[in-house]
Amino acid sequence: MWSLKILPSLGVKLEEKDFSNIANIITETINSKGLEESRAKVRDEAWQCRGSAAKNIVDYITK
């Protein structure tokens, strides 16, 4: 499933041992240029045809 494969590109896996350092993990994740680029790539893959998706669906259904 695409959504499960893409999760590592969006952030970091949290484990119970990380909870005491959660503030730093969040900050590092937010500031990570690599993760920022990955999130942008995933957003572009997931939101193709932004602004025209509804029209495209209607066109497909009515043809």
Image: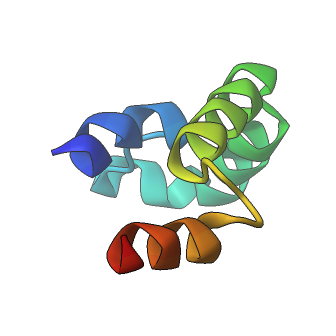
Q: Is residue 62 left or right of residue 40?
A: left
Quadrant housing residue 53: bottom right
The structure residue drawn at horizontal position 49% and vertical position 79%, both measured from the top left corner, is 58
The answer to whether 54 is drawn above or below residue 24 in the figure is below
Pick the front one: 63 or 32: 63
Q: Residue furthest left?
A: 1
Quadrant in the picture for the C terminus: bottom left
Give the image location of residue 42, x and y in percent. 56, 38
Quadrant in which residue 35 is drawn: top right
For the question of whether residue 11 can be seen, the reply is: no
Instruction: Please report the residue visible at 46 percent of the width from the left and 60 percent of the height from the top.
Output: 19
Pick the residue in front: 63 or 24.
Answer: 63
Expressed as whole percent of the image width and height from the top left, the position of residue 57 reads 47, 72
Relative to 55, say whether 13 is above or below: above
Question: Colour scheme of this structure image?
Answer: rainbow
Q: Quick check: can you spot residue 40?
A: yes
User: Left or right: 22 with respect to 30?
Assistant: left
Between residues 18 and 34, which one lies in front from this camera angle? 34
| Rendered-image quadrant of the N terminus | top left
Q: Residue furthest front?
A: 63
